[in-house]
Image (cartoon, grey):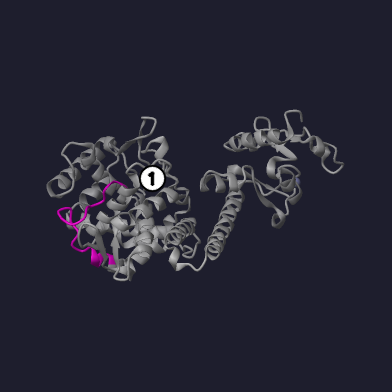
Amino acid sequence: MMIDQILNMISDCSLAKTTGRFVSDKSYAYDTIYFMAKFILETADDENIFNKQLQRDRYIEYTKDIFQIRDLGSGAQNYMIETLNLLCFANLLVKQDNYNYKIAHKNILEYIAERIENAYIFLYLVVYQTFNNDDITDLYKKFISETSPAAKEAVLFDILSVFRNKSVSIGTIDTNWEKQLVKYALIVLGFANNSATVARTLRVKTHDGLIVPVSIKDISINVEGTRTGENSKKVNDYINFFAKDYVQNQLAPYMFINVPHVVVDTAINHIAEDLASLKIEKIIKETDETEYKSKYEQNQFIERKVRARNQNIQRAFKNSLLDHNAHRCPICGFEYEDFLIASHIKPYAQCDDTYDAINNFNGFLMCPNHDKLFEGAKLMTIDAKTGTIILSKQAQESKDFGYLHNTNIDKSLVECERRHYLAWHNAEFYRQNGKKC
Ligand SMILES: [Zn+2]
């Protein structure tokens, strides 16, 4: 079984290990490990050697695209280097020299790249095994059983002192970095174990300069991109689809709490997979032109992939609307579910990122007629402040729907994040029809 193979591979992992590095900054984020695993598998040579120097530019492009980071600085390269370090620490990669890394267990790398949850499972096992080898598991158990923040913090400092005495890569003593290293490991264990991480050193600074506690759900410290500046925020909406049940089932024997077994659909089609595959294929195809007979074929290929991804996003969007809204058209009350359409307020093509594209607040479930009227903000819009239906001059004259003008939809539908998208729709409507409607 894969989990046994992973544990076997990392059986000697200890904080004192001199190769690679125990969870460090970006490498501790399971999503980074997931995307990097895909990238290594795709770009390693026939000998299973990954050359980081050779792939550097491609990787930066890939990361920028995946996380939609506008201004990277040295960020993307760090994502790569720190993940390589962690994979070396776990014996999954063996460093040959300054540039080349040999894949030692391809099947495990493939397992990680299979689904984003597997990357988390891998990371959890690395932390779990290291804690075991360094006798920190009892301290960790104590940490989660303590209830007051002060008591938790006291245990936290005991754990920190173990790190201090053993770790070869802890950074300068008494710096934030030193404490961060402990925090990362606790967040990894804490998420699956439903354990809140509290205490002063488990707080992070947001881009507004606010200090906020790291919440349980933030297994990737950058779930909301809050640690980085406005320009280098990481977009990772795919985390909303993370199947925690699947993770807890797989990890049940290595957990510190008892979690009831649940049946999980293991074949869910994940947006992260589509995203990673699409970006990798695009980047590889763009740079290895010789492999392709013609530009035409290449474009056909990419278009097909984009179409497939769009269908997947449309499906996710409709499910999100069905989950959060009454199953009826807000204009007329039409309820026949098979005919209801997931109608975007801000069209998918104009969304900044996948978050907007699948956000239920960026849409309504509408009957086919009203979906058509609303589409493209040409004939009809819904006032973002009042929920009043506004028709264009042309539409007001229609015997079929002119009567809708100046009627209202249920106000609760606009008293939420939806207002933000409707404001966009209103502006687009007035841009096309002029102010006098
Ligand atoms: Zn309707």
Residue 236 counted in the magenta span: no
Left or right for 128, reference 232:
left
Residue 374, percent across and down?
71, 43
Seen at 31% across and 62% down, the residue is: 253
Residue 41, percent across and down?
36, 64
Residue type, mark 1 in image: Asp
The quarter of the picture where the N terminus appears is: bottom left
Q: Nearer the viewer, residue 400 or 82?
A: 82
Asked where in the image residue 131 lies, by quadrant, the reply is bottom left
- Find the magenta span and give its range: 6-26
Left or right for 59, reference 342:
left
Seen at 58% across and 59% down, the residue is: 307
Asked where in the image residue 361 lies, by quadrant, the reply is top right
Seen at 61% across and 48% down, the residue is: 321
Q: Is residue 187 above or below residue 210?
A: below
Asked where in the image residue 73 lies, by quadrant, the reply is top left
Residue 34, percent across and down?
37, 57
Left or right for 7, reference 230:
left
Residue 255 appears in view: no
Residue 427 appears in view: yes
Q: What kind of element bears circle 1?
A: loop
